[in-house]
Each structure stands twice: as structure tokens, then as C-alpha cells.
Amino acid sequence: MEEEKPKTFYVGTYTNGDSKGIYQYQIDAKGILSKIGLVAKTNNPSFLAKTKDNATLIAIEETNENATGFVKSYAIKKDTLLFKSKSKSGGEHPCFVSVNAKNQVIVANYTSGNIGYLKLDNQNGLTNLLATQQHTGKGTTSRQEAPHAHSAWFHPIKNEVISVDLGTNELWFSSIDEKENKLVLSKQAKLPMAEGAGPRHLVFHPNTKWMYVLNELNNTVSLVKENNDMYNVVNSISMLPEGYTAFTKGADIHISNDGQFLYASNRGHNSIVIYKVNAANGNLTLVGFEDVRGANPRNFSLTPDQKFLLVANQDSNNIISFKRDVKTGKLSFINEIAAPNPVCILF
């Protein structure tokens, strides 16, 4: 039998330490990690996205120059990234970018608390910033005194953008007006989360009906469902062991392709929490916790074949690979490799 080829992946970083930009690594069929090297020199590429055809990589530049950060695009040519364009993100410190099948691009600007909208042309290039949507309001904690857009997502099957604002403590719902090139708030417009929750990221169940929102500040995952064109929070579950009281905050969330297991990362408790998904109603039950063998697991990813889970530990400068038991959802340590301030893993 022919040996499976290693799978390559990109690593986004913060460049305030040893990192110079975006790196490429690979994982082999046994879960062993190896470094390929620096593929793009750039400033704070803390989040990455790829077009559906794998032709273009998009990276944010989490900076603030004259009240804006930037978005960059690169053509993917085998093991090389060719720089193509750089556009303003529409706000300070962009921290998240998303692209859909129509090559529409949305960016979450954390400090400004707004969403930027751009498009990609057929030459791997970004348009200039087309529109921004400014969030307003605030929450109840010290990190919620102003809007802080932390992520923005395209609904998997309809023209809807869901932006997650940690500062206003809400999900914001919009559609894209393609003629006017702008974001238009939906009838519902917003969904408040529990007081002080601090929503950060979300993931859709493969059935596209259930949404799981990771709340960074109160360390919970909320199940959100849509009923008669209105979203509501059905229930929330803790991300921590009972009785855990030390400081910690939630970061990232992903679901297995079969929809059976949900994973989320804890920064402080430094773990991946594992949940089983009830196939009938989407409710979560705790399976357990896996130590990430590092500090500050800001981002993680399942491999395309779902056999492994890779964690980027920002403060311990390492990436860890775990083998994933597809029947139980549990993780077992395989390998570790050094990486400079890694904060995003993209296959």
C-alpha cells in the first residue's frame, strides 16, 4: 500500500518575538510534525483563510496604522506564497478573516469594533475596502466597555454574515447587498448572550441548523438555533472542570465533520475540552479534557482526514499533534514541534 503523503498546513503568528510571518509545516500519516519554513514575511498574520479552490491565501495584518489594520492576499503555488495585494481592513487590529465561495471577504476589526467587507478578483487580488459595518453598545465587564468584533462568519447555506462581538456581548446578523456592496442588518439584527459571556468564535454543525458559540469571558459554549427566522440561545455548557476557579479564558472551537464531537480550547486551564453532540437535539455532554502540553492554546485545527487534532500554543511556542479516536472523540498525544508565537493553523 502506498504511504500517505504528509499534509501541509500554514501557521499564522504574532511577530513581536522570533516570528517573521507565515510558516508552513507538515504532518505525516503517523501524526509526526515537521517544519518546511517561512513562506511569507509579514507583520502579525494572526489569522489566515483560504479560498475554496485553494488558489488564494488571505492573511490579516493585526496592526493599527492611522486607525486601520490590513488584509493581504497571496497566490498559492505549490510550497510558495506569492504576494498579490494589500488592502485596508477598515478598522484597528483586525483579528479574523473569512472568505466564501463567491470570494467575498469579511474581516473582524477588534479594537474598532467593526466589520470590513472586500472581494477577491480572479487574479488572487483583493479589492480596496468596499464597506464597513460599525457595531455599537457595550457589555458589563472591563473588557466590554466598547464594541470588539472578534470574528465574522458566512452562514454555510444562505446570504447571511454572523459577526461575533465580545464587547457588545452579542451576535450581529446581516446580509450582503451585492449591488450596493454593503452589509445590511437583518430583521433580528442582534442576539444577546448571557451577561458577561463575551462571545468570541462560533462553529456550525454540519447539518447547518445548529450553531455553537464559544464565550471567552464566562468559559461556556452556547447552542444557538434558528426558529421562524429568529435565532435564540437554547442552552450553555461550561468549558471547565467543576470547581476550577483560577483565571482562564476560552479561545477556539471546532466540530468533527461527522458532527459527533465538539472541541474547544481553554487558555489558562490550558486544555482542549471534548464534548459529545446529541444527534437528535444538538445538546452537548462532557467527554473530558486533554492537556495541551503548552501555554495559551489560542487556535487549533482538525486535520482534513479528521484523524488528528493540532494545537497552536502561543506562549510556549509549540504546536502539538494529538491522535483523535473517531469513536470516542478522545485525544492522545503524538508529537510536538517548536513554532514562534503560533496563533493560527490552516490546512
Image (cartoon, grey):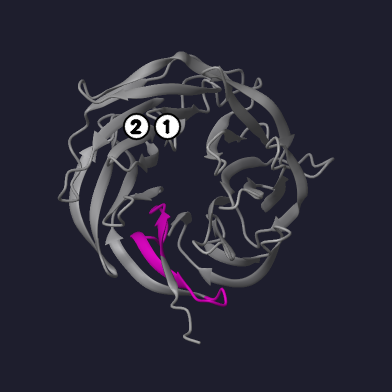
Badge 2: residue crowd in 10 Å (few <14, some 14–19, many ≥20) = many
- Using the rendered image of the protein, determine whether residue 45 is visible from the camera's viewpoint: no
Label 1 packing within 10 angstroms: few (<14), some (14-19), many (20+): many
Image: 107 above or below 342:
above
Image quadrant where residue 252 sits? top right
| Front one among 75 and 231 | 231
Residue 278: x %, y % from top left:
72, 42
Examine the rendered structure and indicate whether residue 169 appears above or below residue 217: above
Write down the region rendered in magenta.
9-32
| Disc 2 element | loop
Q: CA distance from mark 2 to mark 1?
A: 7 Å
Q: Position of residue 226 (x, y in %)?
A: 57, 24
Kindly indicate whether the residue at mark 1 contacts the one at mark 2 (C-beta within 8 angstroms): yes
In this picture, residue 291 sits left or right of residue 141: right
Hey, which quadrant is residue 54 in on the image? bottom left
Q: Looking at the rendered structure, which numbered label has been put on residue 110?
A: 1
* Residue 5 placement (x, y as % from top left): 43, 78
Q: Where does the image place residue 158, in percent across and percent down from the top left?
A: 41, 31
Quarter the C terminus occupies: bottom left
All told, the count of numbered labels is 2
- Under mark 2, the amino acid is Glu
Residue 315 versus residue 203 in the image, above or below: below
Q: Is residue 196 above or below residue 307?
A: above
> Where is mark 2, residue-wise?
92
Q: Is residue 343 left or right of 313 when viewed as pictured?
A: left
